[in-house]
Amino acid sequence: MQQKLDYFRPALTVGAIAGVLSGLPILSAGNCLCCLWIVGGAIIAVRLLAAQAPGPLASSDGAVVGALTGIAAAVADALISIPLRSFNMDLARRILDKAVEMGGELPAGLDEVFNAGAGALSPGWFLLSLFISAAVFALAGALGGVIGVSLAARKPVPPAAPQPPAVPPPTTPPGPTDAA
């Protein structure tokens, strides 16, 4: 009977870390490099899954744990982004104010964008952005999981070379024994 693998523990553990890295303002730029945190997290989750597996993993195992890692990362990213949203808007406003001080000119209507962005995020937009992030992160995670399976694949052990039959020790021929 085949042992059932626990996909959720590695996916939730690594997905939470990848989501936090994706949600933090400066570190989130790592996802601009081919979804670095998500794909890398899925590869690590596959390594954790491979450690508990009795045999080699299939590509489908990697895709499942990678997709679950991506979904967990999307949830963690969304939860981290909520309190940082106003901070990001304030930071962007200060950067643009400095640009104006240095002689730049802001496009018309940009103040309305900042005022709308500084408000509370509606639950509908939050759920829509979470759904889209979860779909994108799940796809990137599934790709990372398949890559992780190919990197963590256990090499099959070659069969041992046949040993020559053991030569029995020489026996003494039967005959009279020296009883003298």
Image (tube, grey):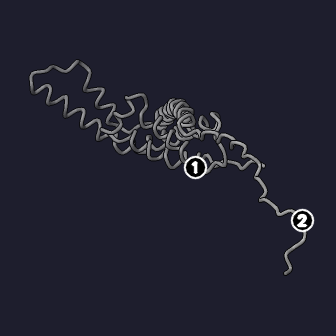
Secondary structure beneath label 1: helix
Vertical placement of residue 25 versus 9, above or below: above
Quote the CA–CA distance across marks 2 and 1: 59 Å
Residue 128 showing in the rendered view: no
Secondary structure beneath label 2: loop
Q: Amino acid at mark 2?
A: Pro
Q: Nearer the viewer, residue 76 or 128?
A: 76
What is the residue that sits farthest to the bottom in this orientation?
Answer: 180
Residue 78 percent location from the top left of the image: 44, 40
Judge left or right: residue 167 versus residue 33.
right
In front of the other: label 2 or label 1? 2
Give the class, few, some or many, for how many residues have Cα within 10 Å of label 2's Cα (few <14, many ≥20): few
Vertical placement of residue 82 versus 150, above or below: below
What is the residue that sits farthest to the right in this orientation?
Answer: 175
Q: Name the residue: 62% across, 33% down.
A: 59
Q: Nearer the viewer, residue 24 or 46?
A: 46
Q: Amino acid at mark 1?
A: Ala
Residue 99 percent location from the top left of the image: 15, 26
Q: Nearer the viewer, residue 170 or 16?
A: 170
Residue 163 showing in the rendered view: yes
Q: Name the residue: 76% across, 52% down.
A: 166
Give the class, few, some or many, for how many residues have Cα within 10 Å of label 1's Cα (few <14, many ≥20): few
Q: Name the residue: 57% across, 36% down.
A: 149
Residue 121 percent location from the top left of the image: 41, 37
What is the residue that sits farthest to the front in this orientation?
Answer: 180
Q: Which residue is denoted by mark 1 in the rendering?
A: 51
Q: Which residue is denoted by mark 2 in the rendering?
A: 174
Judge left or right: residue 20 versus residue 7.
left
Q: Name the residue: 55% across, 40% down.
A: 152
